[in-house]
Image (tube, grey):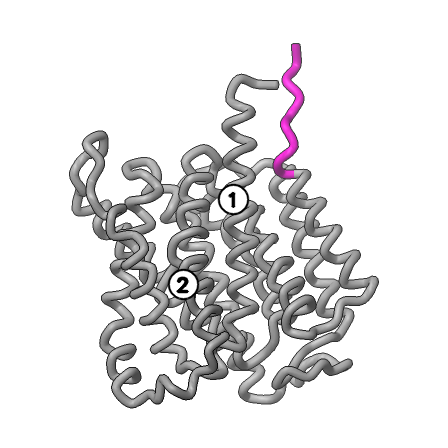
Amino acid sequence: MKPDQPRRLVAYACLALSMSLVGSYVALSKPLAAVIPVFLLAWMRFGIGAMAMVRWLKKPPSEPPLTPQTKRLLFLESLFGNFLFTLCMMYGVSLTSAVYAGVIMASIPAVVALMSWSFLGERIGWRIWASIGLGGCGIALLALSGTTVHNGMVASSAPRLTDFQTALGVLLLFGAVLCEAAYSVIGKRLTQAMGPKRITSLINLWGFALSTPMGLYVALQFDFGSVPAPMWLLLLFYALAACVWTVWLWMTGLKVVPAAQGGVFTVLLPISAALVGVLVLGESLDKVQFMALAIALAGVLLATLPRRVPH
């Protein structure tokens, strides 16, 4: 085992857990968005995250002062990875289903690899491309199995893409894919100058600022008493997972792993979204879909297994 292999394995675990949690809250945002308006939901999410990370805002003595470029990257990281991703994802899932969101988001690893090559100059080896192919093929099988959910009911046919709302949902989910890819690439740049905790707290603060105008406007007209008690607990989990845990885990992993290789782990996002859709939201998973998840996981293993070093 290489000397840095244990550190790399910890980074892999952080990236895998981060994307698994993202997939979980992507699926669980569907029932939340059904009872709380999306802009208000985003604003409360960032507000809860800000309260949880107050102590992370302070600059450690070892970190240099923020440069104008780093400040711009922090804003863009929050704009794409927090604010726009949240809106596109929540509106997209509310118009389609958790399983269908998994199919669309299977393209994230490929988009991350292309952005890493274009903007970071990272070399994309054959194992990364092969793992991206496996992940895409595996999750695409979910579409062929033809299970979707509308209004909480399982249907046996594919969604009617000619329907305006479903088509809009697809476009929004692909917008979330682009935002997630930009988040991965910009995050790699930020980890070269800052620690994971401070990055997490600062981009969340930007997210809170961006969502405040519309969030406050909706809050003044919303009947908070209409929200069932279990939804508040789900909101707390959603906020902590989305704002604190997933971002910190992702930035911790990216300090060690190249962005393109880290992007392979985003295949766990649609996998976990599909599993939560099945186990929690009542969607179905047949043998073909189970095989799809296994193929996608094989892609992750291909990208992360240590390479043989010639003697």
Residue 15 is tagged as: 1
Residue 122 in the image: state x and y as whole percent.
46, 37
Residue range highlighted in magenta: 303-311
> As displayed, is residue 203 above or below residue 36?
above
Residue 161 seen by the camera: no
Badge 1: few (under 14), some or many (20 or more) residues near its Cα, within 10 Å? many
Question: What kind of residue is marked 2?
Answer: Ala
Above or below for 6 versus 96: above
Mark 2 Cα within 10 Å, few/some/many (few <14, many 20+)? many
As drawn, 116 above or below 27: above
In primary-sequence order, the first of circles 2 and 1 is 1
Q: Residue at x 48, y 74 (%)?
A: 172
Question: Which numbered mark, 2 or 1, is in the foreground of this view?
Answer: 2
Q: Is residue 199 magenta?
A: no
Q: Report the residue marked by disc 2.
A: 239
* Residue at the image point whose x is 29% and y is 77% from the top: 215
The residue sitting at 75% across, 57% down in the picture is 292
- Residue 95 position, x and y percent, is 54, 81
| Residue placed furthest toward the right | 287
Q: Is residue 154 left or right of residue 74?
A: right
Q: Quadrant of the C terminus?
A: top right
In space, the residues marked 2 and 1 are separated at their CA atoms by 19 Å
